[in-house]
């Protein structure tokens, strides 16, 4: 157990150290008055430091700030740079594409090759390209409702699928409630969104057998409320119940692409009817895709033939732009390879072993969880089995103290929870520094 007084003491000391070490970050904040809250987008304020670190450059798994400080980067753009910052093949291809044009609202020659690469990697025969995974999830929900004729979707408590209104419903005391933190929400989503706890097979069966749910939108393992692993057999039950009830199963693999080449479902099973993946497949260039089975494709085509002419409500002008197509084509062709995953999984195993060793040495009732190249330590004694349990186990003040302690020693974790990503270019020395910094932080918190 870590005392609250110790957490406060370490957090205050580390905040002072951050201020002394990062004067240019504070100068940037003072000068950037044209940005709301001094940042181009609000979640840049979610880091636990007194001011955001301001990036100057990044390469491989190292980030350099405008204060000249270098960081072992285990955030990697919250998955956007999962395979390393600016891989040489990607940087060269983007420069070539920039000289040829960035967005035409027309297909490009590289697009045909890319669709084949997507099919080979993820196992779905048909694809569409969007600008973000949020946009892809919104499109998939529309398609599922359209082809099924059903109004509802099902999501899991604590899930996050980007800026998708339909999933912003939580459980409180086992009852659905609108997410209290939403800005400007005017529609009550509870009539068209059913929310249950992850791993609750009984609630899942009851919900789907009502016959009015178009799709289940899920991560095969939850990663946005801390990491919640699927219980043995749960995903197979999910697949079976969807088949039984005619419900479409959608896996959002934007984060669980860390599990292995082809994503979690392709690596471990079962397969969904549709999938979404974004962020890392463009190496940081904004893009995402959604793929679907031949049977779903046929139903989508039939719906298109039957509907009234006009805008479908799906897509934006920049969807499938030339830069995004080029980025994904190079990433899938030259960077995201089985060999890259071998290096990532080996590094993640090294990280897990090191963290578990230090937790045991400190006699803490914490644990470490892993989803392929994605690792997280949780400051609770039992791994959560649902989003509700994961929320209850969070200790924001302790997590913030650990994050700023590590940042002050040149180690970046993702600002949300205690998530760490291992890229194929993350070195053993970087992993060992993280484990050593983690041990030093525990020691400081227990003084």
Image (cartoon, rainbow, N blue to C red):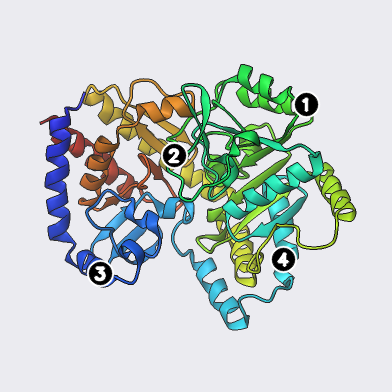
**Front disc: 2 or 3:** 2
How far apart marks 2 and 1 lie (CA) works out to 32 Å
Residue 210 location (% of width, % of height): 73, 23
> On the image, which quarter does residue 205 sit in?
top right
Mark 2 → mark 3, Cα distance in angstroms = 32 Å
Q: CA distance from mark 1 to mark 3?
A: 55 Å
Residue in the image at 73% along x and 28% along y = 242
**Mark 3 surroundings: few (<14), some (14-19) or many (≥20) residues within 10 A:** some
- In the picture, the disc for residue 111 is 4
How far separated are the C-alphas under marks 3 and 4?
Answer: 40 Å
- Looking at the image, which residue is at 78% across and 24% down? 244
Q: Which mark is residue 427?
A: none
Q: Secondary structure at mark 2?
A: loop
Which residue position holds label 3?
Answer: 28
The residue located at (48%, 63%) in the rendering is 87
Q: Nearer the viewer, mark 4 or mark 1?
A: 1
């Amino acid at each position: 157990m870590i005392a609250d007084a110790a957490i406060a003491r370490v957090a205050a000391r580390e905040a002072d150290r951050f201020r002394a070490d990062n004067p240019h970050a504070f100068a940037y904040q003072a000068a950037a008055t044209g940005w709301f809250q001094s940042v181009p987008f609000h979640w840049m304020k979610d880091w636990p430091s007194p001011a955001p670190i301001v990036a100057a450059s990044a390469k491989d798994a190292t980030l350099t700030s405008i204060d000249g400080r270098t960081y072992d980067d285990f955030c990697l753009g919250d998955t956007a740079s999962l395979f390393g910052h600016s891989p040489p093949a990607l940087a060269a291809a983007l420069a070539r594409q920039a000289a040829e044009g960035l967005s035409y609202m027309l297909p490009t020659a590289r697009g045909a090759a890319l669709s084949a690469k997507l099919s080979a990697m993820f196992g779905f025969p048909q694809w569409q390209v969007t600008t973000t995974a949020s946009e892809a999830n919104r499109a998939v929900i529309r398609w599922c409702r359209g082809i099924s004729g059903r109004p509802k979707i099902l999501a899991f408590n604590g899930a996050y699928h980007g800026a998708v209104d339909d999933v912003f419903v939580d459980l409180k005391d086992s009852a659905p409630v609108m997410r209290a933190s939403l800005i400007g929400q005017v529609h009550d989503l509870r009539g068209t969104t059913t929310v249950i706890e992850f791993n609750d097979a009984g609630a899942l069966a009851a919900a789907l057998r009502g016959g009015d749910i178009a799709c289940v939108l899920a991560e095969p393992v939850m990663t946005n409320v801390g990491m919640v692993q699927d219980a043995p057999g749960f995903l197979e039950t999910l697949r079976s119940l969807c088949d039984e009830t005619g419900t479409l199963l959608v896996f959002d693999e934007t984060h669980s692409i860390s599990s292995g080449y082809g994503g979690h479902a392709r690596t471990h099973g079962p397969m969904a009817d549709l999938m979404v993946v974004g962020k890392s497949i463009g190496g940081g260039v904004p893009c995402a895709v959604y793929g679907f089975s031949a049977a779903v494709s046929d139903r989508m085509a039939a719906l298109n033939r039957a509907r009234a002419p006009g805008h479908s409500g799906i897509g934006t002008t920049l969807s499938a732009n030339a830069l995004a197509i080029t980025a994904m084509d190079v990433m899938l062709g030259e960077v995201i390879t089985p060999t890259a995953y071998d290096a990532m999984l080996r590094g993640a195993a090294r990280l897990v072993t090191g963290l578990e060793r230090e937790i045991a040495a400190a006699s803490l009732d914490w644990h470490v969880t892993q989803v392929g190249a994605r690792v997280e330590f949780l400051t609770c004694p039992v791994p959560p089995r649902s989003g509700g349990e994961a929320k209850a186990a969070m200790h924001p003040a302790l997590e913030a103290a650990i994050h700023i302690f590590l940042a002050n020693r040149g180690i970046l974790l993702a600002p949300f929870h205690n998530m760490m990503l291992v890229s194929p270019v993350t070195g053993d020395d970087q992993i060992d520094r993280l484990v050593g910094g983690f041990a030093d932080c525990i020691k400081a918190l227990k003084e």
